[in-house]
Image (cartoon, rainbow, N blue to C red):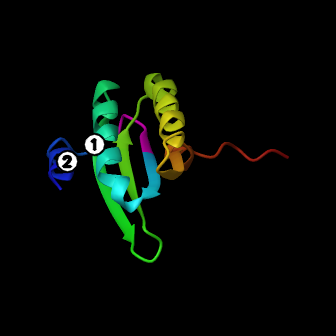
Amino acid sequence: MRAFQTFQAFQSQPTRTTPVSHLTIVCLAEALGALRKQMFIDLTALGLRATHVSITRWSDRNEASATVTLDCPQSSRASLTSLVMRLSGEHSVRRVFWSDDTSRRATPGPASA
């Protein structure tokens, strides 16, 4: 619980100029605290700012997930990809998802004939 409170203390409001990314990790429920703490350390080291954290626990599956919304400039994409790959290799991790909002903010171009 302390790691989550520490994580929340460093959250701030998202900016509109920086692309927003969502990182979701699904893991064994008992490993979530340690993974969340490690994610916070890694994201801070990469200079990425978390703007929102959402936790979900499924008692029937003994799994949990953490979804972190963060500001991720283009220059940090490779580092975030490396973090996702590293998290995917953890023994207690079941799935890792990463998406960004750039496709949602893109304005459609003129229709071609």
Query: Which residue is drawn at the image coordinates 53% and 42% (left, top)?
Result: 88
Report which residue position mark 1 lands on: 37
Q: Specify few, some or many for label 1: CA neighbours under 10 Å numbering under 14, 14-19, or 20 or more.
A: some
Residue 58 in the image: above or below residue 27: below
User: Helix or strand or loop: what does disc 2 sit on?
Assistant: helix
Residue 22 locus on image (x, y percent): 44, 48
Residue 2 vs residue 46: left or right? left
Query: Which residue is drawn at the image coordinates 36% and 53% (left, top)?
Result: 31
Q: Amino acid at mark 1?
A: Lys
Q: Quadrant of residue 47?
A: top left
Residue 85 in the image: above or below residue 8: above
Residue 59 vs residue 2: left or right? right
Query: Which residue is drawn at the image coordinates 35% and 42% (left, top)?
Result: 70
Report which residue position mark 2 lands on: 3
Dominant SS in magenta: loop
Q: Which residues are magenta?
A: 16-21
Q: Are marks 1 and 2 in contact (CB under 8 Å)?
A: yes
Residue 64 locus on image (x, y percent): 40, 62
Please say whether residue 15 is visible from this viewpoint: no
Q: Which mark is residue 67?
A: none
Quadrant assignment for the N terminus: bottom left
Please say whether residue 46 is visible from this viewpoint: yes
